[in-house]
Image: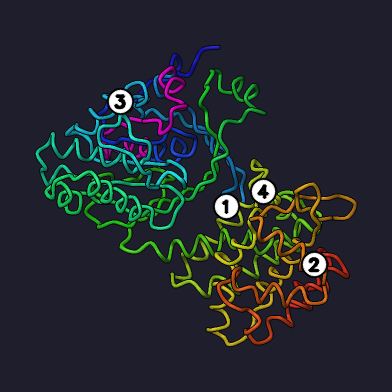
Amino acid sequence: MKNIKDVKKKIHGGLPEKVLQIGEGNFLRAFADWMIDHTNSAGCFNGSVVLCQPIQMGMAEQINAQNGIYTVMMRGVENNQVVERIEEVTSISRCINPYSDYESLVAIAKSPDLKVIISNTTEAGIAYHAGDKLTDKPPVSYPAKMTVLLYERFKKLNGQADKGLLILPVELIERNGDNLKRYVLQYAAEWGLETAFTEWLENANCFANTLVDRIVTGYPRDEIKEIRESLGYEDNILVTCEPFNLWVIEAPQKWANVIPLKGDNVHVIWTSDMTPYRTRKVRILNGAHTVSVLAAYLAGHDIVLSMMKDKVFEQYLRKCIWNEIIPTIPLPKKEMDEFANAVFERFSNPFIKHRLLDISLNSVSKYKARCLPSLLDNINKSHKLPPILPFGLAALIAFYKGTMQDGKYIGTRGDNTYEIRDNADILTFFAKAWQHPEDIVEKVLSNVDFWGQDLTKISGLKKLVDEDLGTIIRDGAATAVKNLVESL
């Protein structure tokens, strides 16, 4: 069977290299590079992307072997209909391995054509690494690499104000652009680089904070034979994802003109403050997971799709999102409704088998970040307890009922066991606390290390969680959720 490069025409790959992308993995290729391909098709950019693998073992060889051409398969639910879109992305010009060809990386940084740097180096990528030097080829950390590249550009182009770059990190940490900039300035100071360079960094470049949202399921190994036969060609870097996509970029509006991301089904928001959008995602999308999956697992479900096919859990989530979460977020209701409806469609995607036990990882910190703010805002706003968010906390306590076995903390569901995964100190706490179930709720809610405050001080919360936990233990999670939903 022929390779995709021998079958499909490279439409956009010969355009000026305006984007340097640190990171060549599935997510960026199904997200940013796909968006840039659409932007080129819309006649709004006229630029190609140079990829660079951020670590020594990467995909440069595979990508270059296909001339940078690959397939994106988008599969999911839109407007209550199952959809599948298959597109070839041709916006990539080449992929650099800086560990064997460092000079090519430096050369693209010096290019007057370059406008944008995008990165995805994992959450741990934006960090300081002691000992990195300007003369390393390359330095270890991504911020150190970035400092070198920007300094080389500054010297080559004489620090011209109009040669600054838009820097778009998509690493999943809060205020990713601010953090990257902080480390770059730290290296510049540590290396004794001139004041004119730091002034150029501050004034000519934009380190944008970003929020990205798309589930990328990667290379479909289990289906690839059938997919190849359907496509009629071989593609070794094909990537699958959901149709939904959103890129929120916090930057002055003038930078939107540098790379005006747009096109069919491309969703990008440029804003002066991304906080409400981050709050929306964390509380609705992530919070809906955390408040539901532990109860759903105890009720017998194993994946999100199964949970969503259960009408009781579907109503449980619907009431929680619209009655308890959306009213706490300062965005127009129409936007909130559209986002929440999209979340329901995403959770119901028949092509994604998202295991509840995978989502259950570190549920204590997840509840604190995703659900507790909505619970507290409800109380502050209405001066009463909502019913579902506290129930989610009771389900968490029930899920964390287990015993230590061979170094693992093991819970029981019917005749089966499951591993409860969290930080060691949290597991040790629950193992000891569940030895005295009569005051388990008191111990959990009063644990300031968990929640940042003593939740027993909230009037009525301990009593409500005690009652919910008792129902879950006595009658089972499925019955407890059913009774709760029917009471609302």
Q: Residue 448 in the image: x percent, y percent?
A: 60, 73
Which residue matches tag 4?
Answer: 358
Q: Nearer the viewer, residue 292 or 253?
A: 292
Contact check, label 2 and label 3, Cβ < 8 Å? no
Which residue matches tag 1?
Answer: 79
Q: Which of the labelled discs sits on residue 102, or is there none?
A: 3
Q: Residue 344 in the image: x percent, y percent?
A: 61, 57
Contact check, label 1 and label 4, Cβ < 8 Å? no
Q: Which residues are magenta?
A: 36-65
**C-alpha span from label 2 to label 3:** 56 Å
Q: Amino acid at mark 2?
A: Trp
Rendered position, 70 above or below 128: above
Q: Secondary structure at mark 2?
A: loop
| Mark closer to the observer (3, 4) | 3
Q: Amino acid at mark 1?
A: Asn
**C-alpha span from label 1 to label 2:** 45 Å
**C-alpha span from label 3 to label 4:** 38 Å
Contact check, label 2 and label 4, Cβ < 8 Å? no
Which residue matches tag 2?
Answer: 434
Examine the structure image and report whether residue 40 is included in the region drawn in magenta.
yes
